Image (cartoon, rainbow, N blue to C red):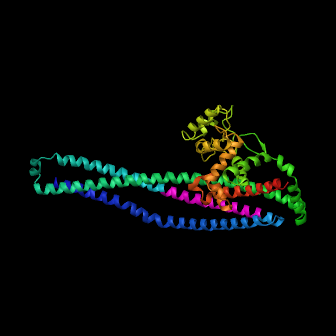
Amino acid sequence: MKEKMRTIILSAIVVVLSAGSFLFVYAETESEEVERKRAELNLELLQIESEIDQEKLVLQDKQREKVTLERDVAILNSNIRKSQLGIKARTLAIGSLVEDIDDKEVVIGILNEKTERQKQSLSQLMRKTNEVDSASLVEIVLGNQKISDFFIDLDSFESIKQSLDASFKEIRSVKNATETEKKKLEEEKREEVSLRVLQEAEKRKIVQNEAEKQQILTVTKGEEVAYQKIIKAKEKTAAEIRTALFALRGSSAIPFGKAYELAVHAEEQTGVRAAFLLGIITQETKLGENIGNCNLPDDPPKYKWQSIMKDPRDTVPYLEITSRLGLDPELMPLSCAPSYGYGGAMGPAQFIPSTWLLVEDEVAKLTGHNPPNPWSPEDAFMASSILLRDNGAAKGGYDNERLAALRYFAGWKNAEKAAYSFYGDGVMSLAAGHQRSIDILRAD
C-alpha cells in the first residue's frame, strides 16, 4: 500500500510541475517571432501616421492661402494621399489584430487540453484519497506499513492535491481572461474593418472631386486667369446658392438659405459657428448608404425599429419620444443598421434616441418647442449645436472644432484615435466650403 501511495504522489508531482511550466515553455517559443512581427507592424504604422500628420499640416497651410488653381489642385492631391495613407494604416492595424487573435486561439486550445488533463488527474486523486481515508488500522498493519509513515504519506498526498487544485484554478482564470481578450480583439477588428470601408468611401468621393477638377483643368487649360473667371462666376451666383437644396435625409429638403438661418440662430444660442454646424449636418446626412431609409411603412421586420436599434438603450427612448410627439413609431424614417453597429438615428442631425434625451430639455428651452421633434430641422439643428458646444466647439478655432466633430462621431473615449481622423477632416473641409457660401450671402 505504501508503494501504491508513493506512485500516486509521484504522478501527482509530475502533473503539478507540468501544469506550472507549460505556459512558460509556450511563451518562450512563441514570443520572439510574434513580438518581432508586432514590432515591425507598429513601426510601420507609426511611420504612416507621421506621414498623415504631415499631410494635415499641408492641408491647413493650403486652405489659408488665396484661392488659386495650383492651391486647389494641391489640396485635392493632399486629401487623396491622406486617405490612401489612412487606408494603409487601417490595413496594418487589422493585420496586427488578426495575429493577436490567432495567438489567443492557440493559447486557449492549449489551456483547454491542460484543463481537461487536470480534471482527470484531480478526479483520480480524489478517488485515491477516499481509498486512503477509508483504510483501517488493521489494513495498515497487515500491509506492513508503520502508522507514522502512513500519516507522513497522507500529509504529502493532501499537499499535492491542494497544489493541483490551485494550479487548476489558475489555468481556468487565465483561460477566462484570454477568452475575454480575444472577444475584445474581435470587436476591435470589426471596428477597424468598418472604418476602412468608410475610408474607401471617402477616397471614392475625393477621386470624384479630382475628376471634376480635371475637367476644370481641361476647360482652363491650366491657366490661372481662366480659373479665376470660373471661381468668380460661381461666387457671383448668390441667387443659386440661396436656392440650392441642403440635402437632409429623413426630412424634407430645405433651401441653403433656410439652413443658414437655422444655423445662425443656433450659433446665437450656443456659440457654435454656423458654418461648422452646417458641416456636421452635411456630413451626418450623407454618411454611409440608406440613411433615413429604414422603418418605412412597407419594410419587412428586419428593417423596422425593433430590429435596427439597440435594445433597450434606444428602443425604450424611441417609444417615449414618438409617444410624446403623437407620432407612429412604425412610420418614422430611421437610419438603417450598418454592418458595424446599430441604426435608428433620427432626423436631419441623425440623433440616436438615447442621445436625444440628453439634450431634449435644453432644445425645448431654446426653441420653445415642447416637446422638441428630432425630425424638425429647427429642433435638430439646435440639438446638434448643443451637443457640439458640450464637446468644446464653442471655444472656436480649427483644432477645437475638429475635436468636437470627432467627439460627436466617436465619443470622447475614441475621439483622438487616428482611425477616426478622416471624419474630423471631412467636417472641417465641408465647414470651410459653407463658410465661403455664408460670406457671399453676408456680402450681398
Residue 207, quarter of picture:
bottom right
Q: Note whether residue 226 is visible.
A: yes
- Spot occupied by residue 387 in the image (x, y as percentages of width and height): 63, 50
- Spot occupied by residue 108 in the image (x, y as percentages of width and height): 44, 53
Considering the whole magenta stretch, tell me its main secondary structure.
Answer: helix
**223 is higher (above) or lower (below) than 163:** below
- Spot occupied by residue 209 in the image (x, y as percentages of width and height): 79, 56
Report the side of 233 relative to 102 (left or right).
right
Report the side of 172 relative to 354 (left or right).
left
Residue at position x 44%, y 65% from top?
29
**42 is higher (above) or lower (below) than 368:** below
Q: Nearer the viewer, residue 143 or 136?
A: 136
The C terminus is located in which quarter? bottom right
Residue 78 lies within the magenta run: yes
- Spot occupied by residue 337 in the image (x, y as percentages of width and height): 63, 43
Report the side of 293 relative to 218 (left or right).
left
Residue range in magenta is 75-103
Q: Nearer the viewer, residue 180 or 52?
A: 52
Q: Note whether residue 223 is visible.
A: no
Residue at position x 23%, y 56% from top?
159
Residue 133 lies within the magenta run: no
Residue at position x 46%, y 56% from top?
106
Report the side of 319 relative to 379 (left or right).
left
